[in-house]
Amino acid sequence: MRPLRGKDWASILGLFLLSPPRVVKAKTTEETSLLARSFTARETALKQELASLHRCEKDLFKQLHAKCREVAKLEARVLPLRIRVFELEKDAEVSKSKIAGLERRSINREVQLGQVEAELLQQAKRFEKAEAEMTGDVLDTHDAGFEDALAQVACAHPEMDTTPFTVSNRVANGQIVPRVLP
């Protein structure tokens, strides 16, 4: 048995299209001739349709081929962009890591700055307290020295009255006058 060719298939298809599911037998020569013409017309129409479909297939194949070339060109343009995006994403991750490190360092520096500021404030308070104590000590020492000097004058001149002499007085134009504080 030989394999069926395109023409054989068309014949079988034509018979199938022309006949109902049961086999039709021609009763006369005229019916046979009519069936043969009908078959030939159908076969010609099917061949034309098949040729038209082949042309459409070729056109579609050409369009597909053109689209594939276009896609290849676009992918060739997109590939470097994808590589650049990948590199930028890696750079972004590195930058994020650096930024996080800088933020941690900044927070640590702010904490240290707060500690230094608090220490400076404490030092300023200690300085003010020490200054007040030293000022008091200097004034006390000055007063004690002045009192010692008055006691020496009173010892050398017991008859002399030393009550008008105080630290808050000064000598101006040969007279003892109260000191004016600025």
Image (spheres, rainbow, N blue to C red):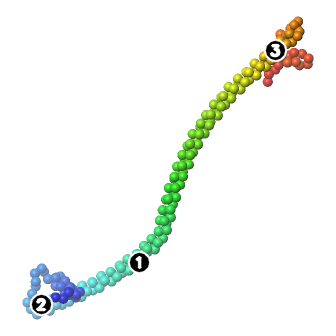
- Front residue (pair 10, 130): 130
Dot 3 alpha-carbon crowd within 10 angstroms: few under 14, some 14 to 19, many 20 or more: few
Q: Is residue 158 above or below residue 16?
A: above
How many labels sit on residues?
3
Disc 1: which residue: 66
State which mark lies toward you, 2 or 1. 1
Residue furthest right in the image: 174
* Residue 128 occupies quadrant: top right
State the CA–CA distance, disc 2 to disc 1.
51 Å
Is 170 positioned to the left or the right of 10 in the image?
right
Are the residues at dot 3 and dot 1 in contact (C-beta closer than 8 Å)? no
Q: Is residue 96 above or below residue 33?
A: above
Tell me which numbered mark, 3 or 1, is placed earlier along the sequence: 1
* Residue 145 occupies quadrant: top right
Disc 3: which residue: 148
State which mark lies toward you, 2 or 3. 3
Name the residue type under label 3.
Asp
Secondary structure at numbered mark 2? helix
Residue 84 in sight: yes
Secondary structure at numbered mark 3? helix
> Residue at horizontal 82%, vertical 19%?
179
Which label number is shown at residue 40?
A: none
> Residue at horizontal 56%, vertical 42%?
108
Disc 2: which residue: 31
Tell me which numbered mark, 2 or 3, is placed earlier along the sequence: 2
- In x, y percent, where is residue 95? 53, 54
Name the residue type under label 1.
Ala
| Quadrant of the drawing holding the N terminus | bottom left
> Residue at horizontal 48%, vertical 62%?
86
Dot 2 alpha-carbon crowd within 10 angstroms: few under 14, some 14 to 19, many 20 or more: few
- In x, y percent, where is residue 10? 21, 86
Residue furthest bottom in the image: 29
